[in-house]
Image: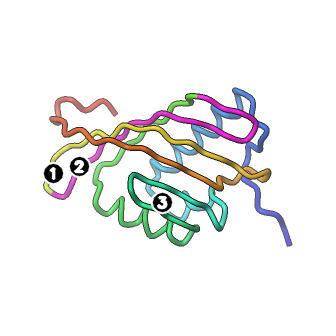
Amino acid sequence: MEIEKKYPLPPFTEATAREKVQLAEDAWNSQDPEKVSKAYTVDTEWRNRSQFINGREEVVAFLTEKWQKEKNYKLRKELWAFTDHKIAVRFEYEYQNAEGAWIRAYGNENWEFNEHGLMQKRYASINDLPIDESELRL
């Protein structure tokens, strides 16, 4: 059986931590729940706002529902800090809700990876701000 790996692998350097963040940003901007889910362990644990999500199947379901509701989604992530197997990011994303109103979401995520480069824990704190279309940045 082949061991599943997601490069770059820990321990992280500043360069590989930045690469991991960019790969995550690119994957989430694809809005492909299956593709995104492959970056996580099969038993991944998430806290996303007040939701608790466990395992890849729940990740796919969560992201599928998310991107059905959040139209014109665009995300930017920025490395905040890192250690051997943990990364913290700041992020913002913009989207239109079902009524067509624009929202900008701000937050922080704490990521913990296994030795194969798969994220086993993701804790996200997120705040929403209604914005006017003229205020779009992404």
- The disc, 2 or 3, on the residue closer to the chain's N-terminal end is 3
Q: Quadrant of residue 24?
A: top right
Q: CA distance from mark 3 to mark 1?
A: 22 Å
Taking 18 as reference, is 118 above or below it? Answer: below
Q: Which mark is residue 100?
A: 1
Q: Which mark is residue 96?
A: 2
- The disc, 3 or 1, on the residue closer to the chain's N-terminal end is 3
Q: Quadrant of residue 62?
A: bottom left
Q: Secondary structure at mark 2?
A: strand
Q: Residues within 10 Å of mark 3 (few under 14, many from 20)?
A: some
Q: Amino acid at mark 1?
A: Gly
* Residue 74 in the image, given as x and y percentages of width and height: 37, 43
C-beta proximity under 8 Å, tags 2 and 1: yes
Q: Residue at x 21, y 29 (%)?
A: 135
Q: Is residue 92 magenta?
A: yes
Q: Amino acid at mark 3?
A: Asp
Q: Residue at x 49, y 36 (%)?
A: 77
Judge from the rendering whether residue 77 lies leftward or rightward of residue 106; answer left or right: right
* Residue 116 in the image, given as x and y percentages of width and height: 78, 53
Q: Residue at x 58, y 38 (%)?
A: 21
Judging by the rendered image, the residue that carries numbered circle 3 is 32
Q: Residue at x 64, y 67 (%)?
A: 43
**Colouring:** rainbow
Q: Is residue 51 magenta?
A: no
Specify start and end residues of the magenta stretch as a single range. 81-98
Q: Secondary structure at mark 1?
A: loop
* Residue 42 in the image, given as x and y percentages of width and height: 65, 67
Q: Amino acid at mark 2?
A: Gln
